[in-house]
């Protein structure tokens, strides 16, 4: 499976926003973006006025990197969203938010999407009672995600639950930490994804050029 393996803090600095790619570290003073909130490289501190194309490109790159999706797959999500009924922006967000690795992260069983992707890859989760080890697996309303019984004592999941217990989760999800289980209640609406730092319309216009 292709994936980005470079330093993720550079991605936040490049996009000029926190994408929360390193879990707990992003909430501390050790966060690289907090210490150096400018693009990496020797010309990072230069002030550059972005063109409309550059604004759209940066929005696409930021959303793609936030969800841990590479270019080819992200474009496929856009093309699929175009063919679906309704608003393409809503459809695109619905597709990326329905990914199993994203839902595991949203439920609080991982501290970052990258960790969630790794845990899913290693077969630590069940969907409707069956093991699913494909991070891009798309969930449907009513699907139940749970940690395998043999995996409930592993340190990353225990620490993630401890870190997230008591925090609000997204309204389209429901979680029961005592039973290591969560439910995907319905598809999300764009306005409800409050931590999405980009204008999705810019992404639609970028791919529609």
Image (tube, rainbow, N blue to C red):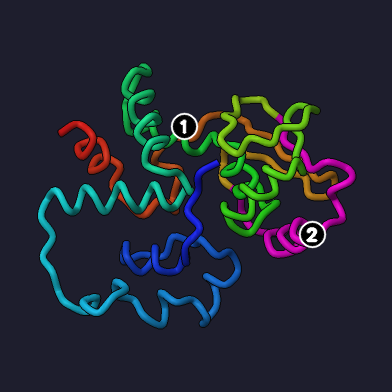
52 left or right of 201 in image: left
Up/down of 80 relative to 72, above or below: above
The boundaries of the magenta stretch are: 144-169
Task: Estimate the x, y position of residue 22 in percent, counting from the top left.
Answer: 55, 65
Residue at the spot 69% in from the left edge and 36% down from the top edge: 133
193 left or right of 123 in image: left
Whether the magenta-drawn stretch holds residue 165 is answered as yes
The quadrant in which the N terminus is found is top right
Query: Considering the numbered disc 1 on the image, is that residue within a helix, a strand or a loop?
Result: helix
Residue 137 image-quadrant placement: top right
Task: Estimate the x, y position of residue 93 in percent, counting from the top left.
Answer: 42, 36
Query: Considering the numbered disc 2 on the image, is that residue within a helix, a strand or a loop?
Result: helix
Residue wearing tag 1: 95
Residue at the spot 51% in from the left edge and 82% down from the top edge: 29
Whether the magenta-drawn stretch holds residue 157 is answered as yes
Residue at the spot 34% in from the left edge and 76% down from the top edge: 37
User: Tag on residue 158?
Assistant: 2
Residue at the spot 72% in from the left edge and 36% down from the top edge: 145
The answer for how far apart the CA atoms under marks 2 and 1 are is: 28 Å
The quadrant in which the C terminus is found is top left
């Amino acid at each position: 499976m292709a994936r980005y393996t470079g330093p993720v803090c550079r991605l936040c600095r490049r996009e000029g926003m926190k994408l929360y790619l390193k879990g707990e570290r992003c909430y501390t003073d050790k966060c690289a973006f907090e210490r150096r909130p400018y693009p990496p490289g020797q010309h990072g501190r230069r002030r550059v006025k972005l063109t409309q194309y550059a604004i759209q490109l940066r929005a696409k790159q930021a959303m793609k990197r936030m969800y841990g999706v590479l270019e080819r797959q992200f474009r496929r999500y856009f093309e699929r969203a175009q063919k679906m009924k309704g608003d393409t922006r809503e459809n695109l967000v619905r597709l990326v938010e329905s990914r199993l690795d994203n839902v595991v992260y949203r439920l609080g069983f991982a501290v970052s999407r990258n960790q969630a992707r790794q845990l899913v890859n290693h077969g630590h989760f069940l969907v409707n009672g069956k093991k699913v080890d494909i991070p891009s697996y798309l969930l449907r309303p009513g699907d139940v995600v749970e940690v395998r019984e043999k995996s409930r004592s592993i340190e990353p999941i225990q620490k993630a639950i401890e870190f997230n217990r008591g925090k609000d989760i997204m309204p389209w999800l429901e979680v029961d930490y005592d039973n290591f289980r969560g439910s995907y209640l319905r598809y999300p609406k764009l306005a409800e994804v409050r931590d999405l730092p980009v204008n999705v319309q810019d992404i639609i216009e970028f791919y529609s050029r």
